[in-house]
Image: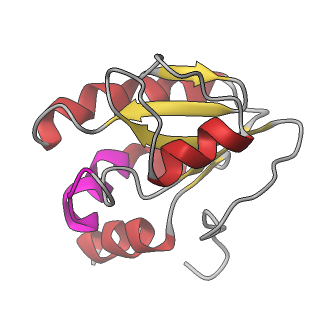
Amino acid sequence: MDNLKYTPENITSLGEDEIFVFGSNLEGRHLGGAARTALRHFGAVMGQGVGLQGQSYAIPTMQGGVETIKPFVDEFIELAREWDQTTFYVTRIGCGIAGFRDEEIAPLFREALTLYNVRLPESFVRILRDEKE
């Protein structure tokens, strides 16, 4: 686990081939938390609640339970596999305003743990590694 790279706590700039992955709402009202950061700094589009926008990628987290988030995470993971020259920084999606716990969201990213171009929050990685032990 020591050689893994994690999503930094505060991201204020990105390189050319880097994407900021944040939790959103389906309406694309990026008013708080990481969504607000994505809007201000990384090209998120007001009114677009899903997918790639500028140097950001929105995963909706405010529409119901964890099971409603999973299909959007799966879509993101497929994109990350295809865009293997791009580094994706996944924030603690759903763990702020949406009110989920890291233990509820981290398992959705289990498949991303093996992707060299996806950085997960350290808390997610610890949870996923503890599951294996």
Left or right: 63, with 53 as reference point? left
Where does residue 7 sit, x and y in percent of width and height? 61, 62
Q: Residue at x 47, y 29 (%)?
A: 76
Q: Residue at x 46, y 54 (%)?
A: 33
Magenta part, dominant SS: helix
Where does residue 120 sit, x and y in percent of width and height? 52, 58
Q: Residue at x 24, y 70 (%)?
A: 131
Specify the color scheme: secondary structure
Where does residue 27 sit, x and y in percent of width and height? 34, 20
Name the foreground residue: 9 vs 118: 9
User: In the orientation shown, which residue stands out farthest toward the bottom?
Assistant: 2
Q: Is residue 101 magenta?
A: yes
Find residue 61 and report its image quarter. top left
Where does residue 64 sit, x and y in percent of width and height? 11, 35
Query: Magenta region: which residues?
Result: 98-110
Left or right: 23, with 16 as reference point? left
Q: Residue at x 63, y 22 (%)?
A: 53
| 76 w.r.t. 31: above or below | above
What is the quadrant of the C terminus in the image? bottom left
Left or right: 81, with 96 as reference point? right
What is the quadrant of the N terminus in the image? bottom right
| 93 w.r.t. 85: above or below | below
| 67 w.r.t. 113: above or below | above
Name the foreground residue: 71 vs 62: 62
| 21 w.r.t. 44: above or below | below
Left or right: 25, with 33 as reference point? left
